[in-house]
Image (tube, helix red, strand yellow):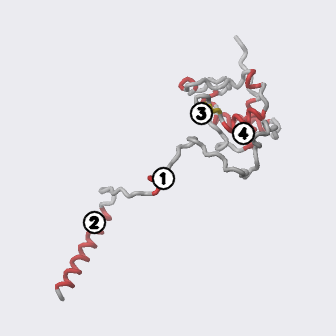
Amino acid sequence: MSLLQRLVLVLTVAALLFGVVMLFTFDIIKIEWISFMEIQPSYKPMESPLPVPARSIPIEGAAYIPGQGSPANPVPADEVSVERGRVFFSQNCVQCHGADGAGNGIISGSLLWQPANLTSEAVQVKADGALFLTVSNGILGADGQIHMPALNENLTVRDRWDVVNYIRTLKAAPAP
């Protein structure tokens, strides 16, 4: 066996042993590998929702046509719709607006603005379509801050109409 063959054999055995040792030290010696997830832009949930692409129609159809005013409510306010709206309201709206819709939710005290009292005359006289657009698009304050997040990514068109139908059932608490 020549000297070159012995050297190749020793290096092969050393590389094999090094590989075996590295397998057992995988959790001990952390090597940071660059992944594509780390170097691309990322968004938190509800942070800067992307606009709908131009000239596109959602799978469930167009909810409304911009510039055509507020849409008409296609969902009858029956028991099923109101109950579905109550469930969606309790999942998405209660933390700010409160269970009774009076704007007294659990986090309302920590917000920079007071959530709307959904039982007030000012809200209840609005058209269903205006409420639908508010639930869909949210409210952007004059200061550029999001005062209410858009729920069009969380709720389907039908779900948003059910929430509107539920809001119609909220009544102001009697004055003491």
Query: What whole-number distance in Å separates the C-alpha atoms at marks 1 and 2?
Result: 34 Å
- Residue drawn at the location 74% of the way across and 22% of the way down: 122
Assess whether mark 4 and mark 1 are in contact (beta carbons under 8 angstroms).
no
- Whether residue 111 sits left or right of residue 52 in the image: it is left
The residue mark sitting in front, 3 or 2, is 3
- Whether residue 81 sits left or right of residue 100 in the image: it is right
What type is the residue that disc 4 sits on? Answer: Arg
Query: What whole-number distance in Å separates the C-alpha atoms at marks 3 and 2?
Result: 54 Å
How dense is the environment of label 1, judged by Cα within 10 Å: few (below 14), some, or many (20 and up)?
few
Question: Residue tagged by mark 3?
Answer: 146
Helix, strand or loop at mark 4: helix
Work out whether 91 lies above or below 52.
above
Query: What whole-number distance in Å separates the C-alpha atoms at marks 4 and 2?
Result: 58 Å
How dense is the environment of label 3, judged by Cα within 10 Å: few (below 14), some, or many (20 and up)?
some
What type is the residue that disc 2 sits on? Answer: Val
| Image quadrant in which you'd find residue 102 | top right
Q: Earlier in the sequence, mark 4 or mark 2?
A: 2
- Residue drawn at the location 57% of the way across and 41% of the way down: 48
Q: Position of residue 118 (x, y in %)?
A: 70, 26
How dense is the environment of label 4, judged by Cα within 10 Å: few (below 14), some, or many (20 and up)?
many
Question: Residue tagged by mark 1?
Answer: 40
- Residue drawn at the location 23% of the way across and 80% of the way down: 8
Q: Position of residue 14 (x, y in %)?
A: 23, 73
Work out whether 55 lies above or below 173.
below
- Residue drawn at the location 56% of the way across and 43% of the way down: 45
Question: Residue tagged by mark 4?
Answer: 160
| Image quadrant in which you'd find residue 129 | top right
Query: What whole-number distance in Å separates the C-alpha atoms at marks 1 and 3?
Result: 25 Å
Image quarter hosting the C terminus: top right
What type is the residue that disc 3 sits on? Answer: Ile
